[in-house]
Image: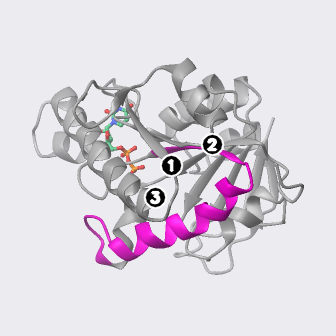
Amino acid sequence: MSDDYIYKRVLLKLSGEALAGSMGYGIDPSVVNSLAQQIHPIVNAGVQLAVVIGGGNIFRGMAGSAEGMDRAQADYIGMLATVMNALALQDAFERHGIFSRVQSAINMQEVSEPFIRRRAIRHLEKGRVVILAAGTGNPYFTTDTTAALRACELDCDCLLKATKVDGIYESDPVKNPSARRFDRITYREVLTQNLHVMDATATSLCMDNNMPLVVFNLMNDGNIARVLKGEAVGTTVYQ
Ligand code: UDP
């Protein structure tokens, strides 16, 4: 592996919103293409990459339930939305020469493999990007929690959470432009200061299992590589 990268195996969490780009809904082809371009050299250099993809660009269970839908039913729709995103990502990855596999937590054998931990690890070892779809397969969870869970069980060195802002701020930087950004912060501080980084389940799972998290801005081209090289990008959360 190239010495430039300090992490050998990482889990990248992409929100569905990130895929929507400026369209605000659905999948923006320019975003998935640019992601594939960023990821290609990293994977070529030997970094093992698993991706958990969200579905908020298509459907969120909470939104459905707010409209009167049964919460669990709505959550299953949300999980299916993540499968569409996963297939779109795989398409872009393979067009850019990145070998990948989609593994789904809800069986969908025509379009994906089932999630099998040992098999996922084998793909990673062979240099294939593993795109993890359908969240945990359970309603009442989020894809952030999925990312925390998979990062732990796939024995990743770090969880990378790609967002639209430059890291974790003391308050919302959109509403408060003078809000201070943290370079480093502990999980306990995140929880006690009620900072909205990930939901509490995801945060405590990472904290309990000593999984470092880097929150960074995906919109800056090349940021994934910068994070993997240990450059001062975004906010690192540690135990
Ligand atoms: N979801 C779920 N269980 C999971 C993961 C996701 O029920 O383990 C559902 C939930 O309804 C959620 C939707 O899938 O709203 C899409 O995921 P999420 O909102 O986490 O996507 P993101 O915000 O990252 O785009």
Asked whether 47 falls inside the magenta stretch, the response is yes
Residue 128 position, x and y percent, is 56, 42
Whether residue 152 is situated above or below residue 101 in the rendered picture: above
**Which residue is pictured at 74% across the width and 56% down the height?**
45
Classify mark 1: helix, strand or loop: loop
Q: Magenta segment range?
A: 23-52
**In contact (CB < 8 Å): disc 3 and disc 1:** yes
Quarter assignment of residue 150: top right
Q: Nearer the viewer, residue 157 or 71?
A: 157
Classify mark 3: helix, strand or loop: helix
Label 2 CA crowd tier, 10 Å (few <14, some 14–19, many 20+): some
Q: Amino acid at mark 2?
A: Gly
Classify mark 2: helix, strand or loop: loop
Left or right of residue 25, residue 53 in this image: right
Q: Of the two numbered discs 1 and 2 on the same chain, state the one appearing first in sequence.
A: 1
> Whole-Å distance between the Cαs marked 1 and 2?
7 Å
> Whole-Å distance between the Cαs marked 3 and 2?
13 Å
Asked whether 159 falls inside the magenta stretch, the response is no
Q: Nearer the viewer, residue 23 or 121?
A: 121
Residue 58 position, x and y percent, is 24, 55
**In contact (CB < 8 Å): disc 1 and disc 2:** yes
Residue identifier under label 1: 99
Q: Amino acid at mark 3?
A: Phe
Q: Nearer the viewer, residue 108 or 168?
A: 108
Q: Residue 93: which numbered mark, if any?
A: 3
Label 3 CA crowd tier, 10 Å (few <14, some 14–19, many 20+): many
Residue identifier under label 2: 127
